[in-house]
Image: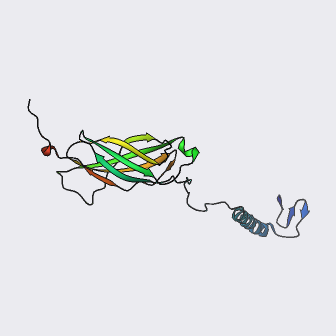
């Protein structure tokens, strides 16, 4: 729509005379009207932020339950766990079990308020087993207290961490020293 201001007395809109309205009145009425219409149009159209961004959701994978940890004489621990539910075929193709460990020196005092720092020590590809039971053999260093947890990962999806399982390795002083 075009507005034409003709002198101080008449206003023409689309070629028609809008009456003997002074141009100063037309200048005061039409700009706020356009602003009001623009704001109304934005509200109706729904522009603006509706809420905080939401990360994409991924289907959760079945959890893992640690069953046992068995230490061996040659300085290894065998962790055994069970999967809590079936895994869909599309997830099974790229699924891996991740074994995480945290360790503290047995000689150092235990810090109750310090966070446990876990590192990835093993990644095992998922294979379909009849009983859903899996195991991994992890080397241990003497003189440490270990905490292990296992989780299942497939692409961006991750299962909940298993409960922690604590393993103590023998202290270096308890190991017999062989002399040559």
Direction top: furthest residue: 180
Left or right for 79, reference 112: right
Q: Residue at the location (76% across, 69% down)?
A: 29
* Above-or-below relation of 143 to 37: above
Taking 117 as reference, is 23 above or below it?
A: below
Q: Foreground residue, 142 or 176?
A: 176
Q: Residue furthest front?
A: 130
The answer to which image quadrant residue 123 occupies is top left
- Point out residue 118 in the picture as x, y percentages from the top left corner: 34, 49
Above or below, 81 against 48 in this view is: above
Residue at the far right in the pictured view: 16
Q: Residue furthest left?
A: 179
Q: In the figure, residue 10 lies in which quadrant?
A: bottom right
Please provide percent x and percent y for residue 92.
53, 44
Q: Position of residue 41 (x, y in %)?
A: 73, 63
The quadrant of the rendering that contains the N terminus is bottom right
Q: Say which residue appears at 43% left-offset and 40% top-offset.
A: 124
User: Along the line of sight, which residue is nearer the eye, 177 or 56?
Assistant: 177
Counting from the top left corner in percent of width and height, residue 81 is at: 40, 50
Horizontal relation, residue 125 to residue 53: left or right: left
Q: Residue at x 43, y 51 (%)?
A: 82
């Amino acid at each position: 729509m075009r507005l034409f201001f003709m002198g101080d007395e008449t206003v023409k809109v689309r070629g028609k005379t809008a009456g003997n309205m002074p141009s100063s009145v037309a200048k005061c009425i039409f700009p706020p009207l356009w602003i009001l219409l623009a704001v109304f149009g934005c509200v109706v159209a729904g522009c603006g932020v509706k809420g905080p961004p939401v990360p994409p959701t991924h289907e959760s994978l079945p959890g893992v339950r640690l069953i046992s940890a068995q230490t061996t004489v040659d300085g290894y621990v065998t962790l055994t766990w069970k999967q809590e539910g079936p895994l869909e075929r599309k997830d099974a193709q790229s699924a891996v079990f991740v074994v995480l460990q945290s360790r503290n020196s047995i000689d150092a005092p235990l810090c109750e308020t310090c966070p446990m720092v876990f590192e990835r020590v093993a990644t095992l590809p998922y294979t379909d087993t009849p009983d859903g039971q899996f195991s991994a053999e992890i080397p241990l260093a003497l003189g440490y207290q270990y905490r292990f947890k296992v989780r299942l990962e497939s692409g961006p999806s991750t299962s909940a961490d298993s409960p922690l399982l604590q393993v103590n390795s023998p202290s270096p002083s308890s190991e017999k020293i062989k002399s040559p």
